[in-house]
């Protein structure tokens, strides 16, 4: 199995630009999670989907952030407009059942 | 508010030492506690604990949960430089698939 796939692996953009991060979960997994990791705040859950439906988006910081999961094999996290404080590593994870989540390699986002 | 607290935040040891990492939690409707290891990339799964007092073991690593004390420890014996990583503790709540993560313990093992 290829594991959770994320793209791009690195993204450098200027403040105000739109950023789209992509994730392909492990085939057969029905839940998908988006996390953000920073030195200050650690690993924080932004949003998660079950069977392509958003279940909990309470971690999404503000309206500039949005996430979609149009089908079982693809999800996006979009930031528009981006700001320097959005710089972080964004992880996608998937699971078949409660508990053991499998993480992707992450996207390191730098907003200048 | 649900929270997971790990200690120490960082630890530096020499190869061969034994280390104990701590995790305490305050969550509503506890279901399980998980340990992950994060090197330079994504967190990788180590253990999932649901029952108090039952040790889980994998090679030199072991972990145990104490539901009465709302805590868990991760032990690593005969540490190696390859054990250098951030160790993350997470708690899962019943009725939800959310994991609440601690900020991690950064372990450095020097040769």
Image: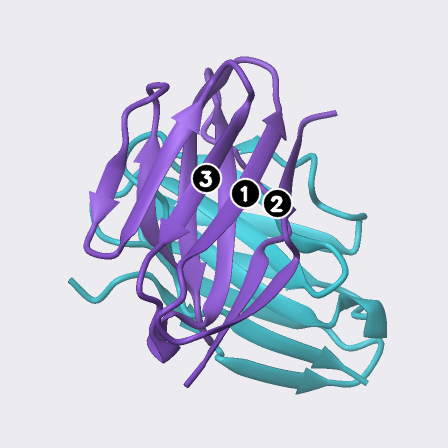
Chain colours: A cyan, B purple
* Residue at figure coordinates x 30%, y 31% from the top left: A97
Q: How far apart are marks 1 and 2 (CA)?
A: 6 Å
Q: Mark on residue B73?
A: 3
- Along the polypeptide, which appears first: circle 1 or circle 3? 1
- Along the polypeptide, which appears first: circle 1 or circle 2? 2
Residue ID for mark 1 = B22
Q: Neighbour class for label 1 at 10 Å: few (<14), some, many (≥20)? A: some
* Residue at figure coordinates x 59%, y 50% from the top left: A67
Q: How far apart are marks 3 and 2 (CA)?
A: 10 Å
Q: Are marks 1 and 3 in contact (CB under 8 Å)?
A: yes
Q: Mark on residue B6?
A: 2
Quarter of image, res A23: bottom left
| Left/right of residue B12 with respect to residue A17 in the rendered view | left
x%, y% of residue A39? 71, 65
x%, y% of residue A26? 26, 54
Q: What's the chain of the residue with tag 2?
A: B
């Amino acid at each position: 199995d290829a594991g959770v796939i994320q793209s791009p692996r690195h993204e450098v953009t200027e403040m105000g630009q739109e950023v789209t991060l992509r994730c392909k979960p492990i085939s057969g997994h029905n839940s998908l999670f988006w996390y953000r990791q920073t030195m200050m705040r650690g690993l924080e859950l932004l949003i998660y989907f079950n069977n392509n439906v958003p279940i909990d988006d309470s971690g999404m910081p503000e309206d500039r952030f949005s996430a979609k999961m149009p089908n079982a094999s693809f999800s996006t996290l979009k930031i528009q407009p981006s700001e320097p404080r959005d710089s972080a590593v964004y992880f996608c994870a998937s699971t078949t059942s409660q508990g053991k989540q499998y993480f992707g390699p992450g996207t390191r986002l730098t907003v200048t | 508010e649900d929270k997971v607290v790990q200690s120490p935040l960082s630890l530096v040891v020499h190869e061969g030492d034994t280390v104990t990492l701590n995790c305490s939690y305050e969550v509503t409707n506890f279901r399980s506690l998980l340990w992950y290891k994060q090197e330079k990339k994504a967190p990788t799964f180590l253990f999932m604990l649901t029952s108090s007092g039952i040790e889980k073991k994998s090679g030199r690593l072991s972990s145990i949960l104490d539901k009465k004390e709302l805590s868990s420890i991760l032990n690593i014996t005969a540490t190696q430089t390859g054990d250098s990583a951030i160790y993350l503790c997470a708690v899962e709540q019943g009725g939800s698939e959310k994991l609440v993560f601690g900020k991690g313990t950064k372990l450095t093992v020097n040769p």
